[in-house]
Amino acid sequence: MSLQNPVFIPGPTNIPEEIRKACDMPTIDHRSPTFARMFKPAVAGVRRVLNMGAGEVIILPSTGTGGWEAAITNTLSQGDTVLAARFGMFSHRWIDLCQRHGLAVQVIETPWGQGAPLGAIEAALRADTGHKIKAVLATHNETATGVRSDIAGIRRALDAAGHPAMLFVDGVSSIGSMPFDMAGWGVDIAVAGSQKGFMLPAGLAILGVSPKALGAMETAGLPRTFFDFRDMLKSYAAGGYPYTPAVGLIAGLAKSIEILEDEGLEAVYARHHRLAEATRRAIAAWGMRPCAASPDLYSDTVTAVLVPDGCNGTELVQLAATKYGVAFGVGLGEVAGKVFRIGHLGMLTDVMLLSGLATAEMCMADLGWTVKLGSGVAAAQEYLRNSTTVALAAAA
Ligand SMILES: *Cc1c(COP(=O)(O)O)cnc(C)c1O
């Protein structure tokens, strides 16, 4: 690794200098009004990024995984049924977490590279006439395969089946980088982390919680202490936390939201789409294709690139790290070795992306893969220079 180079892993992402400075602050008393003055804008900002209606934002010293745990332990009881599709490492881990907490998970096995299967979800909900399913879990952006699922479609499936289950969405690698509409999609809990779209170091789980999920909190039987929303909300009302918050990260979160909103959320989403499209053009020029099975599933934050038969994606990632000091993501689980992943989210410009694509090409040539140096870079350059609508927004 070289500290001069950007990273192209799909989180943690590159941290803007301004955010690093914002996190670097002297100790303050977290029970003082100074903390409340920092905390309130961060909470209000998260509300806008999630496009929340009524409900509460909860910010825990944790990571995305802790956000999953907080979501279920605050709303469900031992033996409750939840419905989830498994189509990648992250959807798998959330299912595993639920099982370890004693929930009955009704799993819809789905090929990796596909998204949440709307028809099967609706069928499962219709079949559940006794309403045993208490929540539907959905991974908005499956970071292992670079697949974006249709959350509005899951809401339609719930409504069409007339099913009262709550909808919990993992938006860890989409929120802040791709459009997210908590109110419009009727999401009951949205889970984000600090180190992806928010461009911060790891250390915060960020959740949006709907009034319906807050209602479920009153009767939920799963044990929780550190993650108990009730303690958190009681302390929030007094401007603080039930324990010591990650003050520097919260200062950084307020700065992150300022940076995102200065660019404009729509412009941020457009920039991510454009960088993702440039990446896909490069991949096509290499004669490869994304793991995501069809264009409607393409993620704008990460692309898992299927490597040709006889090639090993992990070798490319290892060589990029050792020879060029550049980080790409390895394939996880079922697609280990079969893909390598290019993260294109967070603080990223055209110029940064081109350097990553050029590095990937050098590695392919070094490994003896069939590639023409410059072919993917040229395809990305052609696309980027002809689609300049938001080109300078990130740097402004
Ligand atoms: C990164 C990620 C997580 C896990 O987050 P941690 O912060 O590593 O605990 C969960 N879901 C998705 C989709 C992710 O990309």
Image (spheres, grey):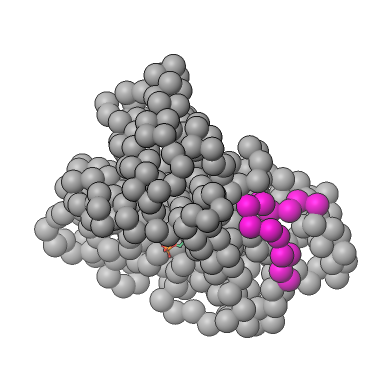
Q: Is residue 196 above or below residue 392?
A: below
On the image, the x and y values in percent for residue 6 come to 27, 45
On the image, the x and y values in percent for residue 37 come to 26, 50
Observer-nearest of 269 and 314: 314
The residue under the point 69% across, 82% down is 79
The residue under the point 58% across, 75% down is 96
Q: Would residue 22 be found to the left or right of residue 275 on screen?
A: left
**Is residue 117 located in the magenta-colored stretch of the structure?**
yes
Q: Would residue 242 be found to the left or right of residue 91 on screen?
A: left
Q: Would residue 213 be found to the left or right of residue 348 on screen?
A: right
Q: Quadrant of residue 227?
A: bottom left
The residue under the point 11% across, 58% down is 26
Image: magenta residue range: 106-119
State the quadrant of the N terminus.
Answer: bottom left
Observer-nearest of 26 and 382: 382
On the image, the x and y values in percent for residue 84 come to 68, 64
Q: Is residue 115 above or below residue 78?
A: above
The residue under the point 41% across, 76% down is 226
State the quadrant of the C terminus.
Answer: top left
